[in-house]
Each structure stands twice: as structure tokens, then as C-alpha cells.
Image: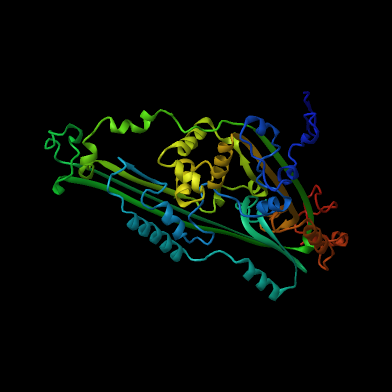
Amino acid sequence: RSVTISKVGVDLNMGDNEVRPFDDTQDYKDGGPKTGTSSGDNIRTVFPFPLFATAEVLVQKLSGPAVKVPPPVLQETGCIDKEYFGMLAAEKGPYITNVPPHFPQDHAADRIERCCKTQEIAQTVHGAVSLDLKAMQAYVAQTDKVVACLPTIGYMNMPGPPNDCGGTMVCNGAVILTEDRIFMFGSNSNQEASASDFISGTTFCTYICCCLPCCYGFCGCIEPCKVTSFNYKQVALRENKDFQDSVRLSTTKVSIKSTSMTQITREYTAGKIPSDGCCKPCCDLCFMCCTCCSGICEPFFYHGSHTFQYSDDGSQMKNLTIESMSERTVGHDDMAWGLMDEMALASLLTDPKTKDLFKKDTNSLECRSLFLKKFGSKFSVEQCQKKVQNLTQGLKTKDLCTSKSVMTINITHWDAASQKIRTTVAVCDPSQVKPEDLMKFQVDASVAKNSMDDSLFKTSASDVAGPKTTTGFGGGGGGILQ
């Protein structure tokens, strides 16, 4: 049997077995993905279960909101998601650590109420202080005719006074074009929530239980002997930053620039299917070989600690850049999982206490809680579910799509506040603005009745804000007309 590898496919010289990698129609032509039980079947499988079987599914995923790891408890409005936080902060939840596991001081209901109340009070006191785009657009329409309005995700080289200009701001806003002005608007809001509980307990009676060496110093059967210390902390932060400015079309030149890129990467290779551990019967029965008094005295143990720790930076706007908001990557990559990560996941799939949960439904509340506890800061729940699917099939897959789109409006104008020519760049939201919208905006701005034209440069020197120049925009003198 000869094997020929080329760019278009793999020819196994087996007639109907000719396959073409990354061709989704091959995967689904028989009504579903091909899954094999032997290594030979895996070799012949083209792509067993791609995340995005059709282009429509991929486009929908790219246009949807970005997945945050771990999922935030704060909604975009700043309010807390009580139902979701109730799962995170519940007894034995993903952010709970009890040492030993049966340490009794875990007051989940009080913790949830305390944390949610703090966030609600902060949101009520802070209120909705950001500028509202719809309200601003409606007010501009009352004073002037709105020609176009394009949503933006940020500004570069912002206008303003000498000590507060030229900066970059990541924000949700818009550029509004009227018959004689361009209004630039942006709003950046940041919400943060964090909470921590720490409870520790021990006993005074360190010599009472000398008859039971394994209970020495930890017996809490006498209530007055118990000693408890605790510390609770909740933090709620709300902050807003708004930007608004306008320039006259008579002193403005508008140009646009748009770039886009899409890249799909698909790869799969053989992996190791996790085993169920040791097959010897003695391993399942070893707990019967010895008897320890800890099981009898467990209700009376009182020595250990309880910890709850959670932090959520909400929209993460303060850490975002315009470049990161213009690029989206969706999909799954098994190669991003390290050896220790795979071992941790395999332990969940083979542990007698948890393996039955994953056999039933990996999307159950118990499984999602375990995923968050093990991998909450590295991988999303959906990525963990896909990894489980691949691990049980004995495969490693990469199915990624990266889309980058940068659409900018370059507004060259005379900045009266800083007394200089400035090109402010408004970066449009690629999920809401189309290339034809940019084209129309530039055409409308250039043909407006008050737009800058060559005749304006023939005005006398008394109408020039800066030193006289014969070159207009970009000239050596740097002057420009008001």
C-alpha cells in the first residue's frame, strides 16, 4: 500500500477511501461524525467532530459576545447575576476550600446574601452616570440634521487642551455626522467585584483526648472548647469615563481605512484514552483492610479552615486595547493543554467519585462546577467539555478561526484647544459597521455644504488661526482655517 501526501488530500490507493483533510462534507455525509474504536479508524477519520460544521455557525460565533474565562458574575449593566453567583458561592462550590473536607463552618446562604447585597448597594449609589448614545443622537437630531452615525470601539490621538490631548481611549461610542459638524462620543465603564471568606477553628482541649491519638487536639465534642476566628471582605467598584468632542466640517478632512483578515486552522492527532486506573480488585477493597477511629469521631472533629475567594473585573475595559477588540479567535485547541492539565482532567474522568457524573452529562451543574474549580482561570467550561469529548475519543484536535477587522475614520482637523493640526482616528466597531457604511460616511462628509474645499485656502490671512501658510494642510507653517 502506498501513501501519497499532497496539498489537496491523502491518497491511500483504496478506491472509495480517498479523503480530503478539513472537508466537513466528508464528516457528515453519512449523517454524523465518524468515530472509531481503534487506531486504524482514527487514522481514516478526516475530522471527527468539528466545532463549526457550517460557515453560518462560524459567522454567528464570531459576531457573538466574547467568551470570558472565568465567566463574570457582573452583567454589562453592572448588576450581579444572583443565580450564577449562587452556584459559585454555594456550599462545596468551585471556589470553596475546606481543610479537612468535613470542616463544618461553611455558611453559604449568609455568604451569598452578603456578597450580592454589597454589589447591589454599590450599583444603586453609583447609578447610570454614563452618557447614553441614543439620547445624544436624539438631541443632536433636534439641533441639526443627522447624516450618518457609526458605532466605534475607541479613539486615537484625541483632541483636547495641551495637557490632556493626543491620548488613546478604548470605549463604546459613535461618530455622528451632521451637515456642518462631526461629533465624537465615547463611554468607558468598569465594574469590579471581589469577595473572600476565611474561617478557621480549633479547640482548647489539647490533652483531653489523649486516649485517642488520632483525635489528639482536635476533638470538639465539648462546645465551650471550640475556638473560631473569621474574616469576611467584599469589594464593589464602579467607575465611568466619557469623552465627547466635535469639529467643524469646514476645517476637517475625512478619510477612511479598512483592513480585514480571516484564518482557519484545523489539526488533529492521536491521543491517549484515559484508563479507569488499576484493575486489581484489592484496590477497590483496600478501605476494608483497616479500621480507623476517624470515621467514628468525624462529627466531633473541630480543627481546620474554610476559604472562599472570588474576583471578577467585569467588562475588563481597563485592560483592553483597540487591537484586542478588533481581533476575535473562536474555537478549541487541545495543544494549549499542558500535561498537568490533561492529568487533572483525566483524574476527574477516572475518579470513582466523579466519573459517573461525566458519563451522564458534562453540562450538568455538578460537572460545570468541577470544571470551574479545576480550570476556572485557564479554560472555559465549553473548552473543558470539548476536551473531554476529544480525550474519550483518543484524539487531540485544533479547530480555530481568527478574524481581524480594523475600520478607521481619520479626521484631520484644526484642534483649537491645543492650537495645532490633529488627525483623530475613530476606530469603528467591526461587528456593527460594514465597509459600505464607511464609504458612505466619507462621501457624505466630503460633499456636505460646509465641508472643506480648496476655495477656503484663498481666505485672507486674518481668517487663519495659525501662521500664514501657502500649503494648507500638512504645510510647513502648520496654519489652518477656522
Farthest bottom residue in view:
142
Instruction: State the quadrant of the N terminus.
Output: top right
Specify the quadrant of the image occupied by residue 185. Answer: bottom right
Q: Residue, x 35% and y 58% (percent of image)? A: 114
Say if residue 449 shows up in the picture.
yes
Q: Residue, x 23% and y 34% (percent of image)? A: 292
Coordinates of residue 198 in the picture (x, y in percent): 32, 46
Of 350 and 252, the residue lying toward us: 350
Q: Is residue 57 above or below residue 19?
A: below
Q: Is the image coloured rainbow, by chain, by secondary structure, or in one colour?
A: rainbow
Of 390 and 56, the residue lying toward us: 390
Instruction: State the quadrant of the C terminus.
Output: bottom right
Q: Residue, x 53% and y 47% (percent of image)? A: 381
Say if residue 236 shows up in the picture.
no
Coordinates of residue 137 in the picture (x, y in percent): 67, 69
Coordinates of residue 12 in the picture (x, y in percent): 77, 29
Q: Is residue 467 above or below residue 261?
A: below
Q: Is residue 371 left or right of residue 61?
A: left
Farthest top residue in view:
1
Q: Is residue 11 left or right of residue 157?
A: right
What count of labels does the image hold?
0
Specify the quadrant of the image occupied by residue 140. Answer: bottom right
Q: Is residue 159 left or right of residue 221?
A: right
Coordinates of residue 338 in the picture (x, y in percent): 54, 32
Of 458 and 197, the residue lying toward us: 197
